[in-house]
Amino acid sequence: MTVFEPEAEIATLDTEEVGGEVVGRSPWELAGRRFLRNKLAIAAGVLFVLIIAVSLAAPLYAKHVADTDPFVSNLSGTFTQNGKTIQVIQQGGGKLGLGETPVGPTWHAKYFLGADSQGRDVAARVLYGGRASLLIGIGSAVLASLLAVVFALIAGFFGGWTDNLLSRLMDLIWAFPVYLLAISLATVLLTAPNGLKIGFVHVSPGSLWIPLVIIGIVYVPYIFRPIRGQVLSLREREFVESAIAQGASNRRLVFSEILPNVAPTVIVLMPLIIATTILTEAALSYLSIGVQAPQASWGTIVEDGQGLLYTRPWVAIAPGIMIVLTVLALNVLGDGLRDALDPRSKLRTKG
């Protein structure tokens, strides 16, 4: 049984008359109608989907548009533009005319955003970096949410020593600063000669699973706490007591009565957690303890461009813009989902 309490101003939308019969709308249908009326949230969702799409198209862009391998150094390479042959790494660049400087943005197909210090196409690397950043961000958020929901359901429903044990475990993880704990775990796993090995599962030190799992574990307590509190509240509600009186098993109570009612909270938290995990991955990769070479992420590309800020700033600016757009889109999308799934929160904010 799913219980939602829509706000008073839309209570009249719960039913409609079709062919002389009154047809009720489900809470999810009402939430969908409210969400579709939020044009800003729709635009944010479209922007996020577009970012995912262009990142997934990175191999097509690199092969058919840029005609380059963004993971191979091209220090002595050349390309042709408007009938002129241009060196990828140019001698005597910069204001002083000394040293070597990669080619800047051409605003054409090849080296659209210029090259980095290794002669690699920045635009192609940004798209490939988006694949890694989004994979880790979304994957770690899903992992954290799954673990948090399972632990919260067990702790909140059964209570007693089970609740105490799981809550103290979450408090232990919560006690460490997020980045300090992530840096410590990443340093240990990345410096291990054989990577991570658990039974028959072996993960190499350079695998994307390392930062994905680390970030996912770090953020479990941040989702566990609100879900556990909601489960504790729902366990005392009348519809749960009614199901117990009817002889419902614990399995039915958890999966049919409680889980559907905490699902909206998880859905609202998901975009915000993805935004947070993307920022965390970018920070770890910038510190060289996240995504490892030869793979790239937005964080590693920002780090690559740090030494070129005065001569070729687009190497660092481009991935930075992608991070800002992605996080902004996810935060606006999360606000829209919150307003749609919990309209009372909007009234409380206004009050």
Image (cartoon, rainbow, N blue to C red):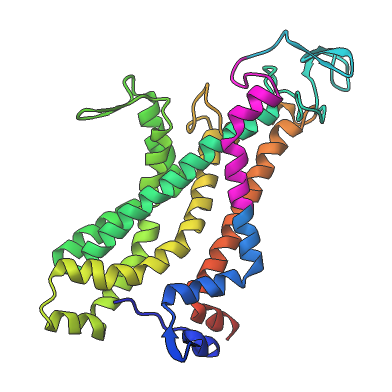
- Provide the major secondary structure of the magenta segment: helix
Q: From the viewer's perspective, is residue 203 above or below residue 257?
A: above
- What residue is drawn where x is 15% and y is 69%? 250
- What residue is drawn where x is 14% and y is 64%? 161
> Number of numbered discs present?
0
Residue 7 in sight here: no
Q: From the viewer's perspective, is residue 133 above or below residue 62?
A: below
Residue 140: x and y in percent read 42, 45
In front of the other: 33 or 9: 33
Residue that sits furthest to the top in the current view = 76
Q: Which residues are magenta?
A: 47-72
Q: Tell me the quarter of the image containing the C terminus.
A: bottom right
Q: Tell me the quarter of the image containing the N terminus.
A: bottom left
Residue 251 in sight here: yes
Which of the 4 image quarters holds residue 308? top right
Residue 230: x and y in percent read 33, 72
Q: Residue 55 lies in magenta, yes or no? A: yes
- What residue is drawn where x is 20% and y is 72%? 253
Residue 148: x and y in percent read 32, 57
Q: Residue 129 lies in magenta, yes or no? A: no
Residue 261: x and y in percent read 34, 72
In front of the other: 313 or 78: 78
252 sits to left or right of 289: left
